[in-house]
Image: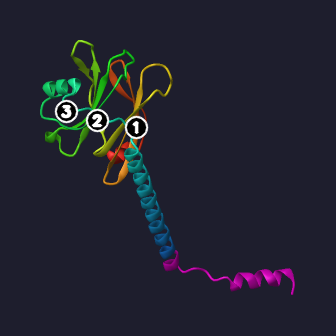
């Protein structure tokens, strides 16, 4: 048998997958990818919940916290989900980061910073979107240059997201985020 005959024989013995088989294979591939993604999201969500339970995140302030009382007085009617304290402006004064819900706006959560003026009053930053469920904040000094950055993480319907913020010129600035559109 020569080389040409072997090549022809190989080509004739190979069977082509019918169109319905190709479509079925494609559907199985898409479904498989979907389930793998869901599994990975569940692992990420479980890891996030475990970190929260390990207390790596800031502890909420008490209901009688001076800054929180100030916020309630200035902006009444908000449901507070999380309020944590840290000197984010590097001025020696404790500031407050608040995650809240305005019942008039539906299923949307917001976050503001209360920047301590040192005289019992606070500058309140413009609000930015915040996660819907399981909100947690952790403070850290990313660039080792004074002002603290913080990471906010949370969920919405099992989708986990986070963003890193810094206060710049009196406003919360989003430095980096991942999947925040999925959890806000």
Query: Which residue range is magenta in the image?
Result: 1-22
Most frequent secondary structure within the magenta stretch = helix
Number of dots carrying numbers: 3
User: Quarter of the image containing the C terminus?
Assistant: top left
Q: Residues within 10 Å of mark 2 (few under 14, many from 20)?
A: some
Q: Is residue 16 magenta?
A: yes
Check the image and report above or below for 104 versus 29: above
Q: Quadrant of residue 17?
A: bottom right
Task: Identify the residue under disc 1.
Answer: 163
Q: Quadrant of residue 149?
A: top left
Name the residue tied to disc 3. 63
Quadrant where the image shows the N terminus? bottom right
First in sequence, mark 3 or 1: give its number: 3
Question: Distance of mark 1 from mark 2, alpha carbons?
Answer: 19 Å
Residue tagged 2: 60
- For disc 1, the neighbor class at 10 Å (few under 14, some 14 to 19, many from 20) is many
For discs 3 and 1, the disc positioned in front in the rendered view: 3
Q: Where does the image place residue 146, in percent across and percent down from the top left? A: 45, 19
Q: Secondary structure at mark 2?
A: loop
Give how far across and how far down residue 88 sits, in percent: 37, 23
Residue at the farthest top position? 119
**For the residue labelled by badge 3, is the local secondary structure a helix, a strand or a loop?**
loop
**Whole-percent x and y of residue 100?**
23, 37
Q: Is residue 77 magenta?
A: no
171 over 14 or under it: above or below: above
């Amino acid at each position: 048998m020569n080389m040409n005959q072997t090549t022809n024989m190989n080509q004739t013995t190979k069977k082509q997958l019918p169109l319905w088989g190709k479509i079925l294979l494609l559907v199985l591939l898409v479904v498989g990818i979907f389930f793998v993604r869901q599994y990975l999201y569940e692992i990420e969500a479980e890891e996030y919940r475990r970190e929260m339970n390990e207390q790596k995140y800031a502890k909420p302030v008490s209901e009688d916290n001076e800054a929180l009382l100030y916020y309630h007085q200035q902006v009444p009617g908000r449901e507070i989900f999380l309020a944590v304290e840290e000197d984010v402006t590097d001025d020696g004064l404790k500031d407050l980061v608040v995650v809240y819900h305005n019942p008039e706006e539906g299923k949307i959560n917001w976050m503001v910073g209360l920047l301590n003026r040192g005289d019992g009053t606070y500058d309140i930053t413009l609000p930015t979107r915040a996660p819907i469920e399981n909100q947690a904040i952790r403070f850290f000094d990313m660039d080792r240059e004074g002002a603290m950055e913080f990471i906010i993480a949370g969920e919405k319907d099992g989708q986990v997201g986070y963003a890193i913020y810094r206060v710049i010129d009196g406003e919360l600035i989003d430095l980096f985020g991942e999947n925040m559109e999925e959890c806000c």
